Amino acid sequence: MFRNQFWRKMEHGTCSTATRYLHTELKAQEDPVIQRKSYFDHPENLLIAMLTDSEPHIRELEVHLILKARSIQEMGSDTHTIAHKKPNRI
């Protein structure tokens, strides 16, 4: 399911159809970039999509990612901590 949605988005995008008119050298550079960046989604929706995928290895990977994220959160590490420096006053 996830892989099919990815390629469906890639097939119908205007970026992918416009690159067919480029020179061969430019097309060889642009196509991999378009393929890597063609699927954007909120992380929460992507996690749900992976859990409902028809491929068992995708679902197993998702469960592993969720459990890993929970263990990091339970250890008390805060990934969004910003260290503030004291102002340098003369």
Image: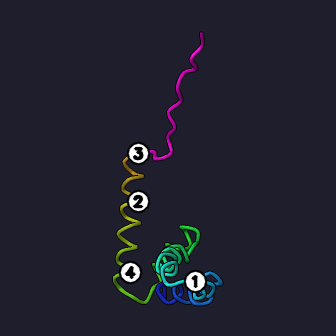
Q: Is residue 34 visible?
A: yes
According to the picture, the residue beneath numbered tag 3 turns out to be 76
Cα–Cα gap, marks 4 and 2: 17 Å
Q: Amino acid at mark 4?
A: Ile
Residue in view at x 50 percent, y 33 percent: 83
Which quadrant does the C terminus fall into?
Answer: top right
- Looking at the image, tell me whether mark 3 or mark 1 is earlier in sequence order: 1
- The answer to whether the residues at label 4 and label 3 have Cβ atoms under 8 Å apart is no
Q: Amino acid at mark 3?
A: Gly
In this view, the mark in front (4 or 2): 4
Cα–Cα gap, marks 4 and 3: 28 Å
Cα–Cα gap, marks 2 and 3: 11 Å
Cα–Cα gap, marks 3 and 1: 51 Å
Q: Which residues are magenta?
A: 77-90
Q: Position of residue 63 (x, y in %)?
A: 38, 72
Q: Position of residue 59 (x, y in %)?
A: 39, 80
According to the picture, the residue beneath numbered tag 2 turns out to be 69
